[in-house]
Amino acid sequence: MNSRLRSVGVLLAGGVGQRVGAATPKQLIEVAGRTIIEHSLAAFERAPEIDEVVVLMTPGYADRVREIVAAGGYRKVSKVVDGGSSRTESTWRALQAIGAQECNVLLHDAVRPLLEPRIITDCVRALETHEAVNVAIPSSDTIFTAVPEDGGEVIGEVLDRSRLRRSQTPQCFRLSVIRRAYELAMADPGFAGGTDDCGVVLRYLPEVPIHLVPGSERNIKVTHPADLHIAELLFELPAPVPRGGDDALAGQVVVVVGEALPVPSKGADVRVLSRADGVRVEDYDSVAKAFGDVGPADHVVVAAGPGHRGELARAGGETVADAVAALHLGALNVARAARPHLRPHLRPHLRRSLLFQVPPGSGALHASGAAAVAALTRALALEWASDGIRVNCVNTGASPLLVAQTSLDILISDLSGQVIDVRVDGA
Ligand SMILES: Nc1ccn([C@@H]2O[C@H](COP(=O)(O)OP(=O)(O)OP(=O)(O)O)[C@@H](O)[C@H]2O)c(=O)n1
Ligand SMILES: C[C@](O)(CO)[C@H](O)COP(=O)(O)O
């Protein structure tokens, strides 16, 4: 089979999010510093296997998506089309929007914002030898059928869990295959929609095997209000961003403020602004002057001094003021001073970022400072998103090597608004 077919990512975002129950469709709700749909857009945009992206959006909200696409510089998006009245109707419209030329089609729920690059790679690879591919994970719950009895329900049959899978997206097909299945479905007066695209292929083209590739527990679908919180937390886990080689920042200007843990930076132009040079993060003017001397920068990495340890009640007034100045005030000052110097770039979502490294510490004084920097990270990511500047935070405390590698991975990723905790085992 032709392994060089164009691959089109389709974001199905035509729903209203009734179960979440917000005033706007759930794909426009912000999680971890970005709208849910933008996370999904970014996943397709950064995937080298995806050539083009088509978005199906809830009628009345297409312009909002176009704004997000323009602000984030998502160049692969070719069309933003109104979705249909059901998921299958949206897929059908997507197939019409794609055109006639054979290609791979990856249909993804826009409300699965944690789609990992590995899954996209596996799907496109599988499409080299299979005409239909789905993403699935095993069930960790026992699943049974429920049967009505006495006005309530009782267990009918306990199903063999080893053969059960939970279906995720993207669901991926050769265009001619999914189009044929939908043509047959649309011509069938008995077709009542369904909950996914594989079901349509299974029903109308049963001779086409649907190959499975492993999904991920992270690849959740935001369906109910609690899922918004779960997604937020999942974004805080170390993200499976592409691992950067030590020369991933070559040719870029990286400004390091304070005692930041070194980021592998072969070939980068690294400028360190330290206390020894008169840069005190608690003093805005000293930071602003130092940035003025440096000029344009691609990335700024800022680290407060050592974190405070111990109970608040035992800390003197000076200690409290110093801790607040080093962590919270310092972060605010560096952000303000750095902003005019972050270099504009043609692909803004890929470059330019501010990264806070929060040192390890303990007790209420430290925790409140760390929380302030985390909140600053999320809010600033939103404020600066339209300028294409990413803002992230890494809570340090693991080995310096791990923190350094994680910091590099974040700088070269397209993450924004993320608070990543490398204290988690196995990070
Ligand atoms: N007419 C529709 C309905 C759903 N979807 C998309 O299909 C995905 C999965 O659907 P679901 O979670 O059910 O989203 P909603 O239909 O918005 O949710 P609800 O059923 O709670 O209203 C979502 O990205 C949703 O936007 C779509 O493109 N067109
Ligand atoms: C496509 C899907 O996400 C696979 O699990 C699911 O079937 C969508 O169901 P929904 O009822 O539209 O949320």
Image (spheres, rainbow, N blue to C red):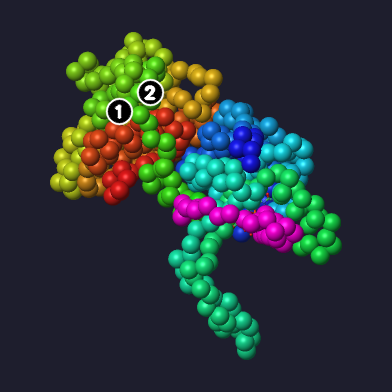
Amino acid identity at mark 1: Val
Asked if residue 178 lies left or right of residue 253, the reply is: right
The image shows residue 412 at horizontal and vertical percentages of 42, 29
Let me know if residue 30 appears in the view: no
Q: Residues within 10 Å of mark 2 (few under 14, many from 20)?
A: many
Q: Are marks 2 and 1 in contact (CB under 8 Å)?
A: yes
Q: Nearer the viewer, residue 279 or 215?
A: 215
Asked if residue 405 lies left or right of residue 168, the reply is: left
Q: Secondary structure at mark 2?
A: loop
The image shows residue 356 at horizontal and vertical percentages of 34, 32
The numbered disc on residue 263 is 1
Q: Secondary structure at mark 1?
A: loop
> Cα distance, mark 2 to mark 1?
9 Å
The numbered disc on residue 249 is 2
Amino acid identity at mark 2: Leu
Q: Residues within 10 Å of mark 1 (few under 14, many from 20)?
A: many
Q: Which residues are magenta?
A: 193-218
Q: Nearer the viewer, residue 51 or 67?
A: 51
The image shows residue 360 at horizontal and vertical percentages of 23, 41
